[in-house]
Image (cartoon, helix red, strand yellow):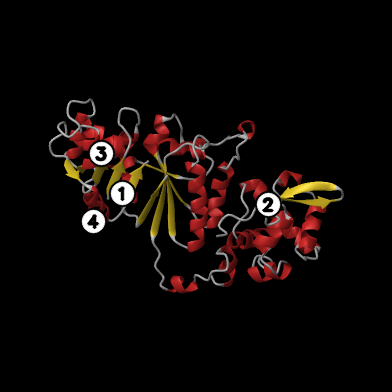
């Protein structure tokens, strides 16, 4: 287990840097995790992060990448619902990076 | 298809569930193992249920488990005994298998 | 598959295996209530992972397994994760074959309307038929 310090407050993470308690997440924590992932957040990035949080809230899991692209396509349009778009935003993998920034656990189906 | 039950019929409904679903399916086979071998014995209140099933499906019991529990002289006629090798053969000769955990 | 799957499969490229094009029928048989034992949650996790392999996956709910799908689960007070909403995510994973045994529902005083996902309610005999058709049956 590890902790990160954001604005003087400690947050527990697992050994891979995923937030342990997603209830503690806020935008500052998200921004901090984004810096750690070397992702420069734009409104497009936040859109995906917020989508993931909503998905998690609805289904209690982080979606597999294939499921994420399909669901984003449905909600935000086909120009965003493809892996090329998502990988441009999160070059090291939307499932890994965007989920981490969103404060979600590692996606199920990630073997 | 092979079905495996390993729970005593006197404290668990697993055997009932299995027979409800496949008790009258032609070509199905049932293997009783561990505490489920008590279902293979004569004179119990389960006997009738097993005999009814035996008119349609094949019923086997795992001999090492029967013997371990001292039930060797009480086995219902027509239930075939298999050893561990026979267990493997049953699994291999059926297309698939469901364990009623 | 291809690029999309690379991450979901931990960087392993399954394309070669896929080229063989063999799609098998997998049925996951759920017979335990949630929370009392770990079976239901474990089954759900395996089902979600199985979706990555593009196989013909179905789920059967029998006996106390039907309680997994009941609406209105609130687990906060027992401090256990409520995983019932995840069954509604299965559709997005292209897992749409959910079979529920009618007799099990009836024995428990439940009807299809009590369940939180769309399912196909079928008789014991039809469940047996479905089960026999599978290449692989995985029991929980």
Residue closest to the far right: A7
The residue at the point 61 percent across, 62 percent down is A65
Among numbered discs 3 and 4, the one appearing first in the sequence: 3
Most foreground residue, C95 or A56: A56
Q: Quadrant of residue C79?
A: top right
Do dots 3 and 1 share one subunit? no
Residue A13 drawn at (x, y percent)? 71, 51
Q: Which mark is residue B65?
A: 3
Separation of marks 2 and 3 at Cα, in angstroms? 46 Å
Taking A90 as reference, is B22 above or below it? above
Separation of marks 3 and 4 at Cα, in angstroms? 22 Å
**Residue placed under numbered mark 2 in the picture:** A14
Foreground: disc 3 or disc 1: 3
The residue at the point 34 percent across, 57 percent down is C135
- Mark yes or no: residue B57 visible: no
Where does the C terminus of chain B fall, quadrant-wise? top left
Q: Secondary structure at mark 4?
A: helix
Q: Which mark is residue B93?
A: 4
């Amino acid at each position: 287990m590890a902790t990160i310090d954001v604005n003087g407050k400690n947050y527990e993470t697992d050994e891979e840097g995923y937030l342990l308690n997603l209830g503690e997440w806020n935008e500052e924590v998200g921004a901090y995790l984004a810096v750690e992932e070397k992702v420069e957040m734009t409104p497009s990035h936040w859109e995906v992060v917020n989508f993931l949080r909503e998905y998690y809230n609805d289904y209690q899991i982080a979606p597999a990448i294939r499921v994420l692209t399909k669901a984003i396509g449905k909600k935000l349009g086909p120009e965003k619902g493809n892996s090329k778009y998502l990988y441009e935003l999160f070059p090291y993998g939307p499932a890994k990076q965007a989920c981490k920034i969103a404060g979600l656990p590692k996606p199920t189906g990630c073997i | 298809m092979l079905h495996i039950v390993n729970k005593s019929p006197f404290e668990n409904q697993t055997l009932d569930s299995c027979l409800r679903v496949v008790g009258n399916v032609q070509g199905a086979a049932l293997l009783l193992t561990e505490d489920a071998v008590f279902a293979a014995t004569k004179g119990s209140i389960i006997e009738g249920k097993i005999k009814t099933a035996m008119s349609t499906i094949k019923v086997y019991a795992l001999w090492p488990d029967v013997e371990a529990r001292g039930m060797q002289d009480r086995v219902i006629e027509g239930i075939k005994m298999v050893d561990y090798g026979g267990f493997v053969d049953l699994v291999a000769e059926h297309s698939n298998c469901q364990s009623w955990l | 598959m291809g690029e999309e799957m690379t991450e979901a499969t931990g960087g392993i490229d399954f394309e070669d295996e896929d080229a063989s094009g063999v799609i098998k029928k997998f049925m996951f048989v759920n017979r335990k209530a949630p929370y009392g034992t770990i079976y239901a949650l474990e089954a759900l996790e395996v089902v979600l992972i199985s979706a990555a392999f593009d196989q013909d996956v179905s789920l059967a709910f029998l006996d106390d397994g039907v309680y997994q799908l009941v609406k209105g689960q609130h687990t906060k007070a027992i401090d256990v994760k409520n995983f019932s909403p995840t069954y509604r995510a299965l559709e997005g994973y292209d897992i749409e074959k959910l079979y529920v045994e009618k007799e099990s529902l009836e024995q428990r005083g439940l009807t299809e309307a009590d369940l939180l996902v769309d399912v196909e309610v079928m008789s014991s005999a039809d469940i047996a038929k479905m089960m026999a058709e599978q290449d692989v049956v995985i029991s929980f």
